[in-house]
Image (spheres, grey):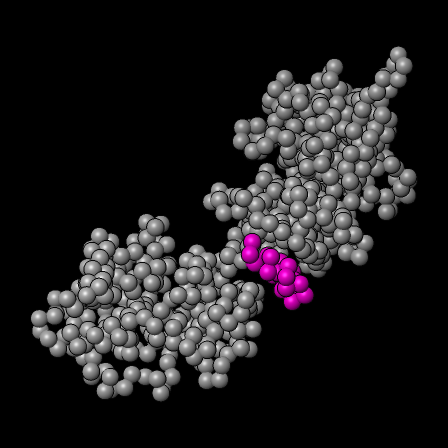
Amino acid sequence: MTDTTDTEKTTHRFEAEVEQVLRLVIESLYSNREVFLRELVSNAADALDKLRFRAVTEPALKDAELKIRLVPDREAKTLTVWDSGVGMTREELTSNLGTIAKSGTRELAQKLKEAKEAGDVSLIGQFGVGFYSAYLVADEVEVVSRAAGADEAFRWTSAGKGEFTVEPAEREAHGTSVVLHLNDEHQEYLDPVTLRRLVERYSDYLSWPIELSTTKKVGDSYETAFESINKGTALWQRPRAEVEDEQYVELYHHLTNDWEKPLAWRHFKLEGTLQFAGIVFVPKVAPMTMWMPEATHGVRLYVKRVFIMDDAEELLPKWLRFARGVVDSEDLSLNVSRELLQDSRIVRTIRKQIVKQTLDLLEEMAKEKPEDYASFWAQFGAILKEGLHMEPEQADALKPLLRFESSAVEGLTSLAEAKERMKEGQKALYYVIGESRKQVEASPHIESLKKKGYEVLFCTDPVDPFVMSSVTEWDGTPIESASEGKLEVDEDEKVDEERESALRDVKERFRVKLQDVVSEVRVTTRLTDSPVCLVIPQGGLQPHLERILRAAQKDVPEQKRILEINPDHPVIENLRKMLEGAKAVEKVDEWITLLYDQAKIAEGSAIDDPASFNRRITALLEEASQRASS
């Protein structure tokens, strides 16, 4: 670059990395072209922050009226983003816009942090990268700037094709105007309605006023006026005591487009090594898209009041996907496009805090508003339970929030309440898994438990087979599946040797006939009303889970059940008597097959041969009806 005076027009080549960035921006960097306005407004806010900081030590700058203006001009096909900020000298224009990340924002932020003089100085990004997003919609860009404290202004001009010019210009006061010469495909950004929408979406909560230039006809002439179009105050940055419930509800409607009021919300702000604030909402009703695989989730992310993205999934685990809200970080590191969050310590810290705040909100609701919590559970309980499977380390926080239907009470109950109702001598809490309450209430697996007056928790959500494998105890009390073979019985109710011996032939016949489908046949006191049942071996898959995995075309190894026999059931006693006559073995085998199919139906599984099952049932009915009619 040759030496020049401030009165000359000079031409410069972009540095190599700038050309690369320009090409990257135009070809693929931003997935949504409208973010150009967010970037330019953020840079304008950055310039205002810098001026406010300088005004601390330069009293002459204190009286400046700090604002941002958007000026669309349909005739000229230009959109101007104007600010009254710190401005730039000729050298800064050349350096900042001709090279990458030379605006000094990073250095200034570090300086503020080290000096601990920042207060609430909001510094947005690195000027020089987001700026180039202007070329997403413009064929040519002009930047007219006058540095604070300087007498001269200068114009930077480029079509983004390898070079730029810098020359003297006129500007009344310090600040910068970025003039976009919009290409024909993007004339919609001259529409005030579009500009209002973009400001509301991306920059509504910037602390600086954003004004839109409007032209109105007055008599025979037109007058230009400026109207403020941003709220200017982020609700989540205000003290909770200053925010009315109606304002929270209004923000929720704005974030979600949900016409219902939220069921509950929590407003939080953390200040320390990291600074961020936010609000988490729990909806009243699940949206129709909640269970769709392609459904997005997450909170709305801001960085220093600048909108970055909706549905920041990195900040909210999938098992809290029902939650809605906003988080605003002072420290979050973003990649060059601000479209994707970097995997960083800051992200993990914010995510951990959002999870904590949401679970604390649910715990508070469960204790203080149990009816509201019951409504929440009906809508989102199955989703919340996924956390036990996805993040087992959250078990201590999630188990108190679990709710179950129960054999002992109407409505829902917690593990703590179920433990309080345990009978004397009861050694565990019990649950049974099935597809509906009606099915599990009729399950043979809980017959002896009901006879003893023991409470059984009903688990009928599709996620329960995954979830309950992680819920093995509560406050020192074991939690056991009623359908597992290890189910403990009282010592005095164990099968005595005499009854065991009397049924030796029946057990052997069951074993021989069913050796291909069951791993063991044993006599049990588990049953009171049913002749037989199938139980899973310890550590085996729940039948319900087995069916889910097979439906998902997963490779599930064949798992043989244990068949348990009720020694006191009349059918079993009749089989014993029938086996005393050798000629009855064939009929006994038919009945054994029928009993096995009935046990499969009782656990919710499909039988292997429905036609043969129907034939056996019909034969039994025919035989019984003949005896009844004779």
Figure quadrant of the N terminus: top right
- Please provide the residue range marked out in magenta: 356-379
Would you place residue 40 above or below residue 440 in this image? Answer: above
Residue 294 drawn above or below residue 399: above
Q: Residue placed at 84% from the left, 37% from the top?
A: 66
- The answer to which image quadrant residue 434 occupies is bottom left
Instruction: Return the x and y of residue 400 as percentages of the image width and height.
Output: 56, 68
Front residue of 9 and 314 = 314
Q: Nearer the viewer, residue 128 or 571?
A: 571
Secondary structure character of the magenta stretch overall: helix
Decide if residue 317 is in sight here.
no
Question: Residue at (64%, 22%) from the top-left corner?
Answer: 186
Query: With 625 as the anchor, is 416 left or right in this view?
Result: right
Q: Nearer the viewer, residue 64 or 374?
A: 374
- Magenta region includes residue 425: no
Residue at position x 60%, y 57% in the image: 375
